[in-house]
């Protein structure tokens, strides 16, 4: 079985960054999906603060100072951090290195196309992760080209290379989950 890398995720932290946007039509909230760093609510309240890696219900990935420092110490390109209002040691994580997600093989479902903004309101079918390129991810952080979820709460899957995954496991970050991304042949064997 050939592992290409890992998808990383964390638990919900029982919080909403922008609860007033939930359920708003995709065209009206597209800016929230594309420019998360601009929409950090100044009145944000983080309910569960103990995690090093977690997500709000509306898909804002929040990491600890310790996680941020790990990324800085390892000099990972394409990773950005934005301070979370009211929390000096919490940051929004954004990843800019893009890999193509294989929506056909994964049978991803696109719902409620809106011709006004050429966007789907909802995209489901993210896991297990299927990548177009069947090659091992280099050390570092990546994100899928497809954002999954509903309305303004859509977000990409964050991926890391094999070496990065090993380093992350060794750090024992609270809340961080890693799941293997298999090559297309092993993935097909598991699903048939």
Image: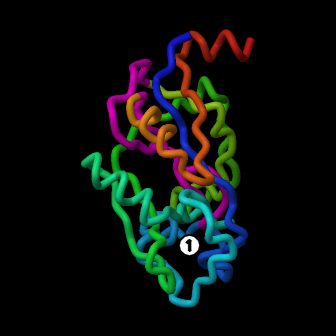
Residue stretch rendered in magenta on the structure: 133-162
**In x, y percent, where is residue 33?**
51, 64
Q: Is residue 83 left or right of residue 119?
A: left
Residue 118 at x, y percent in the picture: 52, 57
Residue at point 44%, 80% (across, down): 88
**Magenta-span inclusion, residue 184:** no
Q: Is residue 90 above or below residue 182?
A: below
Farthest bottom residue in view: 43
Residue highlighted by disc 1:
29
Q: How is the image coloured?
A: rainbow
The image quadrant that residue 38 belongs to is: bottom left
- Please identify the quarter of the rendering in which residue 145 is found: top left
Callout 1 crowding tier (Cα within 10 Å): few <14, some 14–19, many ≥20: some
Quadrant position of the C terminus in the picture: top right
Q: Nearer the viewer, residue 82 or 69?
A: 69
Label 1 secondary element: helix
Q: Is residue 150 magenta?
A: yes
Position in image of residue 22 (x %, y %)? 69, 73
When asked about the image quadrant of residue 108, the answer is: top right
The quadrant in which the N terminus is found is top right
Q: Is residue 192 above or below residue 139?
A: above
The residue lying at 51 percent from left, 88 percent from top is 42
Q: Residue at x 65, y 35 (%)?
A: 127
The image shows a total of numbered marks equal to 1
Where is residue 74? Give x, y as percent.
Answer: 29, 46
Vertical order, 108 against 148 (above or below) = above
């Amino acid at each position: 079985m050939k592992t290409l890398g890992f998808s990383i995720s964390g638990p919900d932290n029982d919080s909403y960054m922008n609860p007033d946007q939930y359920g708003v039509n995709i065209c009206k909230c597209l800016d929230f999906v594309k420019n998360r760093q601009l929409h950090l609510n100044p009145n944000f309240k983080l309910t569960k603060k103990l995690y090093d890696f977690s997500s709000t219900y509306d898909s804002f990935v929040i990491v600890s100072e310790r996680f941020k420092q790990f990324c800085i110490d390892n000099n990972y390109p394409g990773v950005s951090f934005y301070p979370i209002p009211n929390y000096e040691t919490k940051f929004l994580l954004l990843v800019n290195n893009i890999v193509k997600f294989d929506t056909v093989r994964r049978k991803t479902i696109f719902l409620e196309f809106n011709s006004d903004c050429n966007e789907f309101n909802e995209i489901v079918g993210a896991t297990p992760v299927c990548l177009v390129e069947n090659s091992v991810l280099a050390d570092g952080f990546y994100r899928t080209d497809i954002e999954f979820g509903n309305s303004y709460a859509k977000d990409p899957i964050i991926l890391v290379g094999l070496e990065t995954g090993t380093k992350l496991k060794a750090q024992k970050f609270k809340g961080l989950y890693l799941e293997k991304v298999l090559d297309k042949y092993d993935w097909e064997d598991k699903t048939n």
